[in-house]
Image: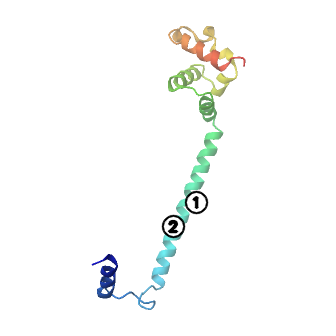
Amino acid sequence: MTLTSSLLLLAQTGAKAPKPGDWSFGWSSVGAVAAVSVTIIFVLWLTTKWAAARKNKNSHSPWGLFTDLCTSHRLTRRERQLVTRLAQHCQLEHPSTLFIESAWWEPERLGPAWLRCRPELEKLRKRLFAVR
C-alpha cells in the first residue's frame, strides 16, 4: 500500500473533525486567556523597567565608569584586579581618575607594599598613558 492510500484509509476510519459549533469556548475561557495575556505583558513590562533601571544605575556609578574604562582599554583580568587594588589603595572616590592622572601610578606614591607589582604597574602605565 502506498502512503497516500494509507492516509486516506486512516482519515475515513478516524474520528470526525470537529465542527464550529462543537467547541465549548465560553466566557470563562476568554477570561483565562485574557488573564494569561495580561500577566505575560506585565512581566515583560516589569523586566524592561528593571533592566533600564539597572543600566541607569550602572551608567551613573563611579565604579561602573571604571569598569567601562577597563573594558575599553582591553585590560586583562589580572590587569583589572591590579588597577582595582590600586584604586582601593589610593581610596579614590572616583576610581576612573587612574585613567586620567598618571600621578597615581608613581612608585613614590604607591609605597613599599607595591614593590612586587611595580614592573607590571609600570608596563600598564606606559600602555595607558603612551603618546600616540
Residue toward you, 55 or 11 = 11
> To which residue does mark 2 refer?
39
Please say if the residues under marks 1 and 2 sit with CB atoms less than 8 Å apart: no
Tell which circle, 1 or 2, labels the residue nearer the N-terminal end: 2
Residue type at numbered disc 1: Trp
Tell me the element at label 1. Answer: helix
Q: Residues within 10 Å of mark 1 (few under 14, many from 20)?
A: few
Asked if 77 appears above or below 130 in the picture, the reply is below
Q: Whole-percent x and y of residue 62?
A: 64, 33
Asked if 129 appears above or below 36 in the picture, the reply is above
Tell me the element at label 2. Answer: helix
Residue toward you, 84 or 132 = 132
Q: Residue at x 49, y 80 (%)?
A: 30
**Quarter of the image holding residue 9?**
bottom left
Q: Which residue is drawn at 68% across and 18% down?
A: 129
Query: Which quadrant is the C terminus positioned in?
Result: top right
**Quarter of the image holding residue 107?**
top right
Q: Which residue lies furthest to the front in this view?
A: 1
Q: Residue at x 54, y 25 (%)?
A: 80
Q: Which residue is drawn at 63% across and 16% down?
A: 125
Q: Whole-percent x and y of residue 121?
A: 57, 15
- Rounded to the nearest angstrom, the CA distance separating label 1 from label 2 is 10 Å
> Which numbered disc covers residue 70?
none
**Quarter of the image holding residue 3?**
bottom left
Residue type at numbered disc 2: Thr
> Which numbered disc covers residue 45?
1
